[in-house]
Image (cartoon, coloured by chain):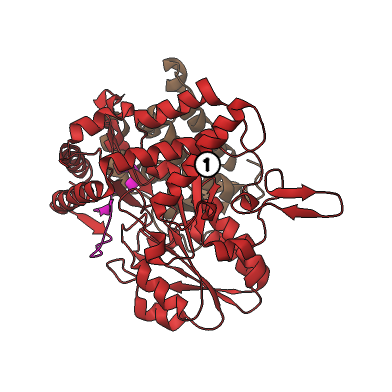
Amino acid sequence: MTTDLYQQIILEHSRNPRFLGVLTDAHTQAEEYNRLCGDRITVFVRMRGDVIEQAQFTGSACAIAKSSASLMMTLLQGKTIQEAMDLYNKFQEFLTQKTVNEQTNKTLELGELRALAGVREFPSRIKCALLPWKAMAKAVHPEGKC
Amino acid sequence: MSFDVKAIRRDFPILNETVHGKPLVYLDNAATTQKPQAVIDTIVDYYTHTNSNVHRGIHTLSQLATNQAENARHIVQKFLNAREDREIIFVRGCTEAMNLVAHSYGALHVNEGDEIIISAQEHHSNIVPWQMLCEEKKALLRIIPINDAGELLLDEYAKLLNERTKLVSVVHVSNTLGTINPIKEITAMAHKYGIPVFVDGAQAVAHFAVDVQDLDVDFYTFSGHKLYAPTGIGVLYGKAEWLEKMPPYHGGGAMIRSVSFEKTTYNELPFKFEAGTPHIEGVIALGAAIEYVWSIGLETISKYEDELLRYGTEQLSQIEGLRIIGTAAHKAGVLSFALADIHPHDVGTILDNDGIAIRTGHHCTQPLMERFGVPALNRASFAFYNTKEEIDALAAGLRKVVRMFVN
């Protein structure tokens, strides 16, 4: 059902994205582009050591990509690069696993990102949900070793 | 003849499918059309009774397959009103036809400093081959601009034509805007300078009758799969006088008269441009598709589809926040729109859940997206098996999207 996909929290974040806008004093930034639909997300990151002190994003994208970016931003602030990448991997696993063990699900610490669970039923939209994460990974791993 | 859409729909078995438990509402005909039973049966018959290679064997099946394939060429010749069968080259589709002409005509006639004219409406397939040619030859690509309705600015086009122009390549009907371009006028203007004109008819031939002699175009192409035939088969029409002068595109079997390691002489038209074993069942099925279209009549089809487009435009215009992109005076089959600031992929997903198939994205016309200031668009495109009830379903689906997103 599309109502499972477009939960209130998704719609709300896509309408009022958190941490939206260019971060003028960013140390690093990266853009990710979906060739299929033309969506673009740019992630800006200001680092303190290996900690993401502040992260923001800009772009034009669908509700799924935008809300995923917004939710990602709420989780990223203050995380280490390692923690951010762990979260990315867990989220990726969460979206691509056919069935998620409820117990594992709870320990994933994905928080509100779980609202994107509906994407699992829409394979063509998984890319949308992962777009901002790819941009984030590219930004914090500019040499592409993610 | 009177038009009985219910009877027509029975000819297309896929229209009985359900998607997510809802009856399929297929409004993505500009991407590809569905196939009538007559075309499906032709393919099955061919493999059941005739399968053999063409122009090679003396045995009965090879003769039969050759006859059927050449009969299909004759059908296409009549369909486009070409002068002769040999002006009909079978290709994979419009993309291959454009690459063929860019490569073959380009090798012969395009040099450094020359110019090729295309339009702002072009599909990527009518941009990239010319860009590649221009890069190779250090030639220049010039673009005919459009107005806000999506119509070509012919005054601007007139200014682009000059003695350095070597080819004009324009789309007959825009796949994104639906604009029907005044090809006869465009051709006449180019011919004053002796410049040949290539027309992309991908979105035209299924919707109205095309007469290449009346249009006086030098090259014309269409893809079978947008004309109720299978994918992988298309047609390049070229005036024999051009095709005879142009070098072959692909080398191989069938396109030769004789081969030795010292020298190869090429076969006559159309075979010079048809290297290798062709898409035989595709060729024959394309003939069957054209005969099916004839059985309904292109005039009848045009009239009915115009009515669908008029009704669709009316219904969709009433939806709050919906902006139709492409409002030319002469349009065919295509209704593109932006819906408030809702991303087309979200629109497409929600409609799909109600069984409604539309195209969402950049439609392979990224320069047009830029021209209209949108990252992507929604597009409903019609065929003669569509109904007003399906347009009502689309409108209801779009209202649902608006309710979900705009509050």
Residue at coordinates 60% horizontally, 26% vertically from top-left?
Answer: B60
Q: Is residue A16 magenta?
A: no
Q: Give the position of the C terminus of chain A as an image quadrant.
A: top right
On the image, numbered disc 1 is attached to which residue? B70
Can residue B278 be seen? yes
Callout 1 secondary element = helix
Residue at coordinates 52% horizontally, 33% vertically from top-left?
Answer: B281
Instruction: Give the left or right position of residue B340, taking residue A125 as reference.
Output: left
Chain designation of label 1: B
Instruction: Give the left or right position of residue B341, taking residue A41 as reference.
Output: left
Crowding near the residue tagged with mark 1, few <14, some 14–19, many ≥20 C-alpha atoms within 10 Å:
some
Q: Is residue B197 above or below residue B379?
A: below
Disc 1 marks a residue whose amino acid type is: Glu
Range of magenta residues: B326-346
Judging by colour alone, the chain drawn in brown in this rendered image is: A
Residue at coordinates 19% horizontally, 36% vertically from top-left?
Answer: B5
Q: Give the position of the N terminus of chain A as an image quadrant.
A: top left
Most foreground residue, A59 or B259: B259
Q: Is residue B337 magenta?
A: yes
Most foreground residue, B390 or B323: B390
Q: Is residue B347 above or below residue A123?
A: below
Q: How many marks?
A: 1
Residue at coordinates 24% horizontally, 26% vertically from top-left?
Answer: B22
Judging by colour alone, the chain drawn in red in this rendered image is: B
Most foreground residue, B349 or B260: B260
Q: Residue B28: x and y, percent? A: 33, 42
Q: Residue B372: x and y, percent? A: 34, 64
Q: Quadrant of the rendered structure where residue B357 is?
A: top left
Q: Quadrant of the rendered structure where residue A69 is?
A: top left
